[in-house]
Amino acid sequence: MNSNERLREMPRLLVRVCAGLDEQTVRRKPEGMPFALVEHAWHLADLEREGFGTRLHRLLDEEHPSLPDFPGDRIALERHYLMGVACAPGLCPIGPP
């Protein structure tokens, strides 16, 4: 499986992994780690849309694009990722199952 195929498979993989976990598990922050699993999922979704997506559009559409930083830690706090919907089938922020 090449890199593009692995990236395309990632949403389905995350849904499968999350489907077997209870709410407490997906919201628990492992010792020494800044994010719980549900926070990572929401962060990846926002980073894809607002970080990488925005940058790709600007690179393609602008002659001298400005590529601002994506402040993931700040956005995670502002958007309350930890309280977000866990990766129940069809509700994973990364994409459809």
Image: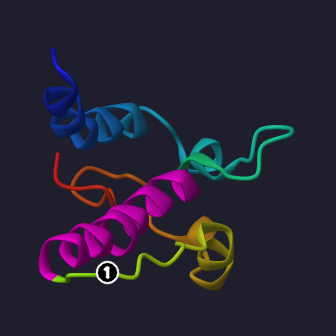
Tell me the chief SS of the magenta region.
helix
Task: Give the x, y percent position of residue 22.
Answer: 53, 42
Q: Indicate the colouring scheme.
A: rainbow
Quarter of image, res 12:
top left
Seen from the viewer's position, the closer of residues 65 and 96 is: 65
Q: Which residues are magenta?
A: 38-61
Name the residue located 32 percent from the left edge and 56 percent from the top edge. 92
Badge 1 element: loop
Placement of 4 over or under 27, stated as above or below: above
- Is residue 84 in the magenta section? no
Whether residue 17 sits left or right of residue 91 in the image: it is right
Q: Is residue 76 above or below residue 14?
A: below
Which residue carries the number 1 mark? Answer: 65
Q: Which one is in front, 68 or 3?
A: 68
Residue 46 coordinates in the image, percent (x, y): 40, 69
Q: Say which amino acid is labelled 1.
A: Pro
Q: Quadrant of residue 2?
A: top left
Rendered-image quadrant of the N terminus: top left
What is the residue that sits farthest to the top in this orientation? 1
| Residue at the extreme front | 63
Q: Residue at x 29, y 76 (%)?
A: 54
Q: Position of residue 42 (x, y in %)?
A: 46, 62
Q: Is residue 58 left or right of residue 26?
A: left
Residue depicted at x 52% and y 72% = 70
| Residue in the image at 56% along x and 81% along y | 79
In this view of the protein, which residue sits in the foreground, 69 or 23? 69
- Mark 1 nearby-residue class (10 Å; few <14, some 14–19, many ≥20): few
Q: Residue furthest right?
A: 32
Q: In the rendered structure, does residue 54 fall within the stretch colored magenta?
A: yes
